[in-house]
Image (cartoon, helix red, strand yellow):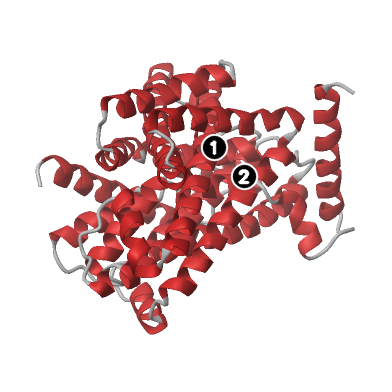
Amino acid sequence: MTVVTQHIERDSKAVAAARAALSQKKRGIRALLPFVGPAFIAAIAYVDPGNYATNIQSGSEFGYKLLWVVVLANLMAMLIQNMSAKLGIATGRSLPEMCRQYFPTWLSYIMWGFSEVAAMATDIAEFLGATLGLNLLFHIPMLLATVLTGITTYLILTLERFGFRPLEKFIASFVIVIALCYIVETVLAKPQLSQIVYHSVVPWMGNKDALLLAVGVIGATVMPHAVYLHSGLTQNRVTPRNDSEKRKIARFNTKEVIVAMVLAGFVNLSMMFMAASAFHGTGHTQIADISTAYKTLTPLLGSASAAVFLVSLLASGISSSAVGTMAGQVIMQGFVGFTIPVWVRRVITMLPTFIIVALGVDPTQTLVISQVVLSLVLPMPVIALVYFTRRKDIMGVLVNKKSVTVLATICTVVIVTLNLILLYLSFFG
């Protein structure tokens, strides 16, 4: 049996299971399972090493007080990712493909250029996270750890040859591993439940440093490549045969988005309240990088806690780097209509990280710079997404309700405003 035959056969089984759910032959969790995958792949972008840096710094400096920012960011992410998934289902096209079809050619090429820069900036953060994890956990030299990370992520991406399900399951398992790690961290850190509940819903903004971190948390949460990728993952996964099936598929995908984003939100909350309990509560209020967090955790909570922290970081870095490469393919294919082999993209996107490591540049500072680059690019996909999903002639029965468009517009304004603040504070503040 050839690889192509296996690919078709495995995908056919998954699609057949989805068809059974659409015809109501399956119900409950068994009906949802065939549609689980795209949102979990997108969710990896929400628990990447960039989130580790901002959440740990926020928790160590301000305790539990910025937890509400994580909740707000996660709610915005839930709305945006659901709209992206819905666009793919309604049109059969990814967001970059829609931009190429409806926007002037010059604008599509500009968006492609910026999006490629964002994809590389994202990959630097993710690649560095995995490299740091290998270095700290197994004491592997940084340069060698970079090479190992590149090989590992490429091998993960080769799973796509066997259909979309094996890769989806593999990536989803990484999300679950990260979540389990933070359940362990929560038990070991013993955070104050009353403080978590209170500060998750009550906004607080004490000074300009808190504002900068709050903007950084949101900037590190909603990622441009995840917005582009999600539409590409749903566009031809289960092709709807009529409007009724479009509605049903969209409902299943909404449920999956909620589950995946709630899980990602729990991980981000856990990062922050673990840092609040372990660092801020013990007077370690200046933990601003991942290496220091690891070294400080050992005497405070023991070697087990520090090891679990690094396992989660390694899982985050490797899986998010693989997802970043997938997003790069969707971006290039959509905006300019051609692709390059995965191994070529993997080599190109790992080169900046390799150079950074070889030159001995501070990894944490690099993570901060990468978030600034992402802040420059993020408004483009979000604005384009709102523009397309509000148009009935494009979305048909899946067009946004007016209330959804209003909420999405508010989210867009908030994201753009906060990212402008982040850029101003980064360069002039």
Label located before the other in sequence (1 or 2) = 2
Of 390 and 160, which appears nearest the observer? 160
Residue 78 location (% of width, % of height): 50, 56
| Quadrant in which residue 426 is drawn | top left
On-image quarter of the N terminus: top right
Q: Residue at x 74, y 57 (%)?
A: 32
Residue carrying label 1: 323
Q: Does dot 1 land on a helix, a strand or a loop?
A: helix
Residue type, mark 2 in image: Ile
- Say if mark 1 contacts mark 2, CB within 8 Å: yes
Residue 338 location (% of width, % of height): 56, 15
| Above or below: residue 222 compared with residue 99 | below
In this rendering, position of residue 21 left or right of residue 368: right
| Above or below: residue 248 compared with residue 234 | below
Q: Residue at x 58, y 60 (%)?
A: 258
| Above or below: residue 400 compared with residue 195 | above
Q: Does dot 2 land on a helix, a strand or a loop?
A: helix
Of 413 and 230, which appears nearest the observer? 230
| Quadrant in which residue 368 is drawn | top left
User: Which residue of the protein is positioned furthest toward the left in this rendering?
Assistant: 428
